[in-house]
């Protein structure tokens, strides 16, 4: 417990507090009156309003589109199901800058919709909402679908046998069991869209701004640190509230349900209704999730003989001091280090949270661990720079800064994946082993390890993929001679000319493939009891 | 409880990780070393390898470059970290943001060796020498040649032309609050129409269908119909706020290379931008930093700069490359504005502009 707490204190709370203090402290005195001033501005209130309603709209839309998907993935057995399940997760770990550009190519001018029907959605709120669905589809499929697959269908059948109508049986049996998972998924989607950054920045144009985007603008472009600090606090409070509700729903979900192995609940679709549901879901996945990625790949190949890919190996002294391809190696190294940190910190935290004597304080820490997901990456990045630059923690010019920031985002995934599995380990197994004379070490090795090993691998895989795609904080602290993939993509995109643009597309495609492969491996490992993601 | 066991193992792992961090930071903290000079700049910083090697060979310093996002971001970040700066020299603060850097004490005085060769028009801060002018460029409206010849329309020549009905819904520009060409274009209009006139001008521009996007990349590579990226993205605005050096860039980065530039420049819409370098306050290696600033004013660097950063040299007698002569030129009579005036008005103007044009 001590290590995760120390980790979060030094690498999260301290940097964030430092940057807030920088904005709100004048000559050593807190200027808390600024909070009222900033919130009274009509521009800022507009941002708050827009942030909230677009998050609500995105959440509703995501649930509408993804819940049928969750059902199909949970209950239907069809060829390619596992591959497709991994495919829908790819968007979730892609860097926002890549996705934004790919989406613009789809719904923007000259995009597919434009070509076919003359429909353009760029700089409208629809582009933002659709991209949010693209990102968060997987959250619903994995959170709700994961549980749905384990609900025993015989319970519903029993209710029908006793005379309940199909609808009534579903409403009385399945819905109550599913509701907490739906609520948890909805809250996660709301959290991610409430703090949306890259998507809104790229697709929203200058008129749409979420809290996170506004924090970035105020800090990085307008240099109004006081306003940025106030907005950070506002976002902090809002995210804290969302997480508190989330923690509550998660706890409710852990009430005993009769769960079965998902492989018995899934079966081939029967009848026209089920087949058309399956077809509908496949079409929506194809249009919303696969198409933007396909446009990306198509553009990366839009040069004879893989010209854009070959250009990646050229060291022309232009954008970087190294060939862009070197970013792949950097990214992998950073991601491995970040994964190691995230697994250690997250694993320790999850272990501490599982202890039966864990008190309220520890449970509160559970929610706190999720905070990095919702707190502005920009704030964290800037905070790192101004706070970790003097002894005792002088890491400013160290490479470890990047993995540390990435690990912050990875830890929540590790905790969320490990927690249910650790909690499910039956204490009696350990006692039995101990009674039979096993040493504590042996008990751990023979009982616990085999049970959690797969979960640990999955957690590591997720942390790895998330680290690989992290952009917001990395862009401030990654060293230019060691750019990560997302940073390299953003840099290439910001330079004029075909070749740079094509190289950005090619690097994005590579990143996408690496993430997809990582996720496919995870699918093979999945134990199905694991995870809310 | 066996969770204790997990903890033991994980703590072990953790110590390995953390000790790795410790040794990592020792190896790579560079700015303290006398042999290394660290440059902090924006993303557009670029130099030919052999030119930089020459400097390293002659001076005995190793140059480390930290590119920190776009120009505004890099300046703001440098100010945030000025007590313990990331490097020794900062390059890339321009005349629109110069006052922010100077007022926040980002730089210390140094009169560079070549400062006498800098053309007088570009010199600033000559009493304190906190910054040294390095390059210059013009922010101008670019046009798509194909569009205008197809529609038998003359491209706009001036700020005033842009509000004419013939050019309705043709122009895309950048957010002045977040983008340096956007800010430059706003300042250009303010220089042209005066402190009171620019708001009326922007109302007319808005009535004439100007589109505002967040950054240069989106404006130029997505919305503009004349650039390679814009063509691909199906951009439909034939006028864009960009640079006078963008047409040569279209040729040089063209794939395949076109024989003539597909875009042109409306020279009556230009605002001149000058970029400066300075020795950072609290720099770890002031001696190396000074040597590096001297290097930035050498003929070798000044002549290497145009093809790398698409800007013009500031010293007397520096040659510009053939492509620059062939496919573009510097604006003959750009708008300019005194740094003090920019400093006094910038934030207020951007605020008024934002509520006028965006909200």
Image (cartoon, coloured by chain):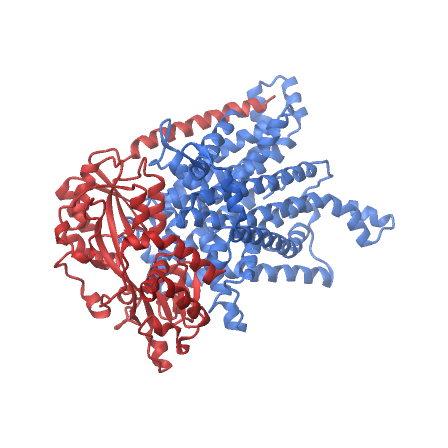
Chain colours: A blue, B red
Of residues A509 and A119, the one drawn nearer to the viewer in this rendering = A119
Of residues A418 and B145, the one drawn nearer to the viewer in this rendering = B145
Determine which quarter of the picture holds residue A333. top left
Q: Please state the total of marks drawn on the protein image.
A: 0
Name of the residue lying farthest toward the front: B196
Of residues A66 and A309, the one drawn nearer to the viewer in this rendering = A66
**Residue located at (58% from left, 44% from top):** A533
Percent of width and height locating residue B66: 30, 44
**Residue located at (20% from left, 45% from top):** B129
Percent of width and height locating residue A53: 60, 53
Percent of width and height locating residue A15: 44, 35
Name of the residue lying farthest toward the bottom: B152
Q: Quadrant of the N terminus of chain B?
A: top right
Q: Is residue A499 visible?
A: yes
Of residues B302 and A72, the one drawn nearer to the viewer in this rendering = B302
Determine which quarter of the picture holds residue B4. top right
Percent of width and height locating residue B245: 27, 64
Q: Is residue A454 visible?
A: no
């Amino acid at each position: 417990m001590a290590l995760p707490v120390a980790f979060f204190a030094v690498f999260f709370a301290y940097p964030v507090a430092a940057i807030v203090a920088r904005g709100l402290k004048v000559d050593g005195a807190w200027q808390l009156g600024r909070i009222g001033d900033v919130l009274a501005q009509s521009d800022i209130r507009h941002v708050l309003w827009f942030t909230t309603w677009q998050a609500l709209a995105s959440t509703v839309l995501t649930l509408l589109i993804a819940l049928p998907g969750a059902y199909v993935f949970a209950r239907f057995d069809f060829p390619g199901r596992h591959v497709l399940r991994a495919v829908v997760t790819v968007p979730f770990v892609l860097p926002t800058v890549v996705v934004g550009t790919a989406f613009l190519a789809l719904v923007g001018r000259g995009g597919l919709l434009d070509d076919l029907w003359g429909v353009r959605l760029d700089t409208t709120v629809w582009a933002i909402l659709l991209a949010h669905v693209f990102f968060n589809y997987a959250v619903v499929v994995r959170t709700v679908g994961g549980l749905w697959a384990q609900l025993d269908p015989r319970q519903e059948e029993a209710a029908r046998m006793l005379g309940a109508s199909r609808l009534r049986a579903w409403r009385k049996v399945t819905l109550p069991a599913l509701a907490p998972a739906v609520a948890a998924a909805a809250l996660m989607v709301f959290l991610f869209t409430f703090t949306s950054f890259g998507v809104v920045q790229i697709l929203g144009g200058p008129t749409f701004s979420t809290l996170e985007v506004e924090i970035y603008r105020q800090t990085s472009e307008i240099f109004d640190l006081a306003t940025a600090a106030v907005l950070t606090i506002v976002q902090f409070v809002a995210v804290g509230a969302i997480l508190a509700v989330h923690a509550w729903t998660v706890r409710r979900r852990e009430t005993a349900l009769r769960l079965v192995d998902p492989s018995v609940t899934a079966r081939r679709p029967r009848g026209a209704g089920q087949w058309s549901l399956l077809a509908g879901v496949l079409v929506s996945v194809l249009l919303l999730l696969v198409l933007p990625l396909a446009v990306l790949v198509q553009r990366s190949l839009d040069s004879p003989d893989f010209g854009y890919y070959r250009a990646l190996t050229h060291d022309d002294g232009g954008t970087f001091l190294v060939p862009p391809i070197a970013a792949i190696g950097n990214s992998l190294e950073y991601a491995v280090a970040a994964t190691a940190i995230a697994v250690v910190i997250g694993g320790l935290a999850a272990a501490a949270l599982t202890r039966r004597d864990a008190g309220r304080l520890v449970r509160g820490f559970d929610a706190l661990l999720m905070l990095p997901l919702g707190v502005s990456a920009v704030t964290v990045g800037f905070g790192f720079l101004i706070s970790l630059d003097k002894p005792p923690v002088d890491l400013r010019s160290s490479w470890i800064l990047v993995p540390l920031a990435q690990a912050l985002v990875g830890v929540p995934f590790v905790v969320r994946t490990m927690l249910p599995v650790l909690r499910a380990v039956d204490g009696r197994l350990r006692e039995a082993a101990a009674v039979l004379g096993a040493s504590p070490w042996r008990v751990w090795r023979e009982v616990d390890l085999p049970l959690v090993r797969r979960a640990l691998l999955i957690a590591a895989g997720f942390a790895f993929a998330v680290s690989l795609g992290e952009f917001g904080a990395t862009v401030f602290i990654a060293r230019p001679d060691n750019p990560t993939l997302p940073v390299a993509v953003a840099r290439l995109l910001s330079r004029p000319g075909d070749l740079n643009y094509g190289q950005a597309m090619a690097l994005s495609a590579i990143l996408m493939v690496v993430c997809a492969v990582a996720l496919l491996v995870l699918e093979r490992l999945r134990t199905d009891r694991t995870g809310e993601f | 409880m066996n969770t204790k066991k997990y903890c033991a193992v994980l703590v072990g792992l953790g110590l390995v990780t953390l000790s790795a961090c410790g040794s990592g930071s020792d190896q790579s903290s560079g700015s303290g070393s006398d042999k290394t000079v660290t440059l902090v700049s924006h993303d557009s910083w670029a130099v030919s390898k052999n030119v930089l090697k020459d400097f390293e060979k002659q001076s005995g310093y190793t140059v480390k470059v930290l590119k920190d996002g776009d120009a505004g971001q890099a300046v703001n970040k440098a100010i945030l970290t000025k007590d313990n700066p990331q490097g020794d020299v900062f390059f890339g603060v321009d005349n629109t943001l110069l006052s922010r850097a100077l007022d926040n004490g980002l730089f210390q005085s140094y009169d560079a060796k070549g400062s006498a060769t800098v053309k007088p028009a570009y010199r600033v801060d000559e009493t304190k020498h906190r910054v040294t002018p390095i390059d210059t460029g013009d922010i101008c409206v670019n046009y798509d040649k194909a569009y205008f010849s197809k529609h038998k329309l003359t491209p706009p020549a001036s700020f005033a032309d842009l509000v004419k009905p013939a050019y309705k819904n043709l122009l895309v520009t950048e957010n002045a609050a977040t983008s340096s060409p956007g800010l430059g274009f706003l300042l250009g209009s303010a220089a042209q129409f005066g402190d009171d006139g620019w708001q009326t001008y922007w109302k007319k521009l808005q009535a004439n269908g100007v589109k505002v996007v967040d950054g240069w990349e989106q404006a130029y590579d997505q919305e503009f119909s004349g650039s390679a990226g814009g063509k691909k993205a199906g951009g439909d605005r034939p006028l864009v706020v960009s640079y006078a050096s963008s047409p040569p860039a279209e040729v040089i980065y063209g794939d395949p290379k076109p024989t003539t530039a597909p875009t042109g420049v409306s020279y009556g819409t230009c605002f001149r931008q000058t970029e400066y370098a300075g020795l950072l306050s609290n720099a770890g290696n002031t001696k190396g930093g000074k040597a590096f600033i001297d290097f930035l004013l050498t003929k070798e660097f000044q002549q290497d700069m145009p093809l790398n950063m698409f800007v013009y040299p500031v010293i007397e007698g520096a040659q510009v490359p053939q492509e620059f002569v062939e496919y573009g030129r510097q604006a003959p009579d750009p708008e300019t504005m005194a740094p003090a005036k920019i400093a006094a008005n910038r934030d207020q103007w951007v605020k008024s502009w934002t509520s006028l044009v965006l909200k």
